[in-house]
Amino acid sequence: MPITLTLTQGALPEGQEAVAIARITDSFLKHHALSGNKVMTPNVTAHVALLPKGHTFAGGKPVEGAWVETKTPSFALADHDVQTAFFGEATQILHELSGGKLDKDRIWANGVHTVDGTWNIDGKAMTNAEIGAAVSNG
């Protein structure tokens, strides 16, 4: 389940990107009651994209900001309470790690649900049902 964190350079102090990813990953797992799950934990992946100032925009104008995007099977982030809790916590994490410099109205997030059967875990394309079965054993 990839999480993409896109940041304008300087939105977080240098070196805080890894802290942000660790905390956002933990939050994702926690809000799905999967903390420590041996199947899901190593399969919540992430990457950070740092973009130079002047290359990130809101309303067509340059802005310093942060964007969180998840790509998940349809059963993840399916409940509005989970969506609200996870994305709210991710926003708070980024705001705090910026030292309050990054206003919450400059942190955007979205979740994308993917086609069933497109998850490749341990070298095998798995359906939602197969993932569910593997997770229940983990």
Image (cartoon, helix red, strand yellow):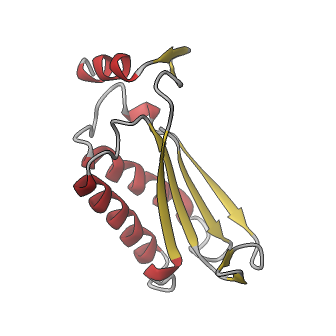
Q: Quadrant of the C terminus?
A: top left
Report which quarter residue 72 is drawn in.
Answer: top left
State whether residue 20 is above or below residue 22. below
52 or 15, nearer to the observer: 52
Pinpoint residue 108: horizontal percent, then vertical percent.
50, 69
State whether residue 76 is above or below residue 61. above
State whether residue 63 is above or below residue 90. below
98 or 56, nearer to the observer: 56
Pinpoint residue 136: horizontal percent, then vertical percent.
24, 21
The residue at 52%/42% (across/down) is 2
The residue at 37%/31% (across/down) is 40
State whether residue 93 is above or below residue 86. below
Report which quarter residue 134 is drawn in.
Answer: top left
Pinpoint residue 54: horizontal percent, then vertical percent.
77, 79
Q: Is residue 56 left or right of residue 6?
A: right
The residue at 33%/26% (across/down) is 38
Q: Is residue 6 left or right of residue 33?
A: right
Report which quarter residue 92 is drawn in.
Answer: bottom left
- The residue furthest top is 124
Pinpoint residue 125: horizontal percent, then vertical percent.
52, 16
The residue at 28%/35% (across/down) is 36
Q: Is residue 60 left or right of residue 3?
A: right
Question: How many numbered markers are drawn?
Answer: 0
39 or 71, nearer to the observer: 71
